[in-house]
Image (spheres, rainbow, N blue to C red):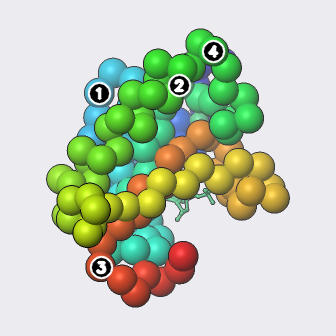
Amino acid sequence: MSVDENCLFCKIAAGKIPSRKVYEDDHIYAFHDINPWAPVHFLMVPKLHIPSLAQAGPEHEALLGRMLVLAPRLALEQGCKPYPEGGFRVVINTGDEGGQEIHHLHVHVMGGPRPWLRG
Ligand code: AMP
Ligand code: ZN
């Protein structure tokens, strides 16, 4: 399935529900988390509907690699200080016990001066 019409993040990635955009290309959409834990907290999602990392397969290797490589660039653009003094945290919650609430694969990128609200 490429897009799930009932999925919140599919709707956000398609611009059908408003969000504060951080980045967009043909395959990836990034936007600020509505309930940030840290001074910088944005989400990166594939435009393709993949429910979680547990459903990622070999056909998604390029997409996932692209998202990971994009993370440091967007983190810097959003105000994270450079590695090693600055940096950021990348989290992919997967499944109920993994703390996943929205079932569309998303990468949390969090950073900025501490203390953070959580984590
Ligand atoms: P997770 O627990 O990993 O599934 O995280 C879902 C994240 O999506 C949470 O950090 C929420 O704050 C965030 N979120 C939920 N709805 C929206 C929205 N409409 N716009 C931006 N972020 C959202
Ligand atoms: Zn989706």
Residue topped by disc 3: 113
Circle nearer the N terminus (2, 1): 1
Q: Which residue is mark 4?
A: 58
Q: Which image quarter: residue 50? A: top right
The reply to whether discs 4 and 3 touch (Cβ–Cβ < 8 Å) is no
Q: Residue at x 43, y 44 (%)?
A: 44
Residue 71 point in image, percent of width and height: 35, 45
Dot 3 falls on a residue whose secondary structure is loop
- Distance between the alpha carbons at the discs numbered 2 and 1: 12 Å
Callout 2 crowding tier (Cα within 10 Å): few <14, some 14–19, many ≥20: some
* Residue 109 in the image, given as x and y percentages of width and height: 42, 56
* Above or below 59: residue 53: below
What residue does disc 1 label?
25
Query: Quick one: label 3 or label 2, which is nearer the N terminus?
Result: 2
Using the rendered view, name the quadrant where residue 13 is placed: top left
Is residue 46 depicted above or below 1 in this figure?
below
Picture quarter with ligand 2? top right
Which mark is on residue 45?
none
Amino acid of disc 1: Asp
Please tell me the numbered disc located at residue 48.
Answer: 2
Residue at 26% over, 69% down:
85
